Amino acid sequence: MVDTFIIELIQPNGLAMDASGYLDWEGLICMEKTGKCTEEHRKLVEEWLKNQGMKKVVTSELFDIWWD
């Protein structure tokens, strides 16, 4: 599932991901190059995970990973 997530969503959208977990996962998704994720990126991630049958999908508001 993780490989599919990276291949189908992360890479094509120029994103990078740092995540870990076993049954419960958490992670951070950012731009692969300098830049800011958009609300569209956040929604794409949330919808992709829910469409794969993930339960309890929670996404935070966008924030600057370099300054927050």
Image (spheres, grey):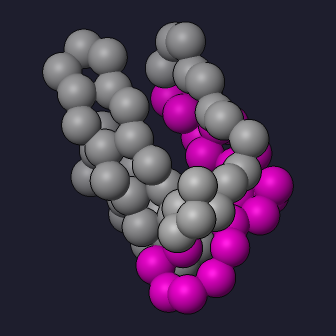
The residue under the point 63% across, 33% down is 59
Of 37 and 44, the residue lying toward us: 37
In the image, residue 2 lies at what x, y percent? 29, 44
In the image, residue 56 lies at what x, y percent? 55, 12
23 sits to left or right of 16: left
Give the residues drawn in magenta, as a range: 31-52
Is any part of residue 3 visible from this angle?
yes
Q: Reply yes or no: does residue 29 show up in magenta.
A: no
The residue under the point 32% across, 53% down is 18
Q: Residue furthest right?
A: 39
Which quadrant of the figure contains the C terminus?
bottom right
Which quadrant of the figure contains the N terminus?
top left
Is any part of residue 4 visible from this angle?
no
The residue under the point 57% across, 22% down is 57
Up-down: is 15 above or below 32? above
Q: Residue furthest front?
A: 67
Of 65 and 1, the residue lying toward us: 65
- Quadrant of the rendered image containing residue 16: bottom left
Up-down: is 15 above or below 49? below
Of 42 and 61, the residue lying toward us: 61
Q: Residue furthest left?
A: 22
In the image, residue 60 lies at what x, y percent? 66, 35
- Quadrant of the rendered image containing residue 47: top right
Of 51 and 58, the residue lying toward us: 58
Q: Reply yes or no: does residue 38 show up in magenta.
A: yes
Up-down: is 36 above or below 20? below
In the image, residue 36 lies at what x, y percent? 68, 73
The residue under the point 71% across, 51% down is 62
36 sits to left or right of 30: right
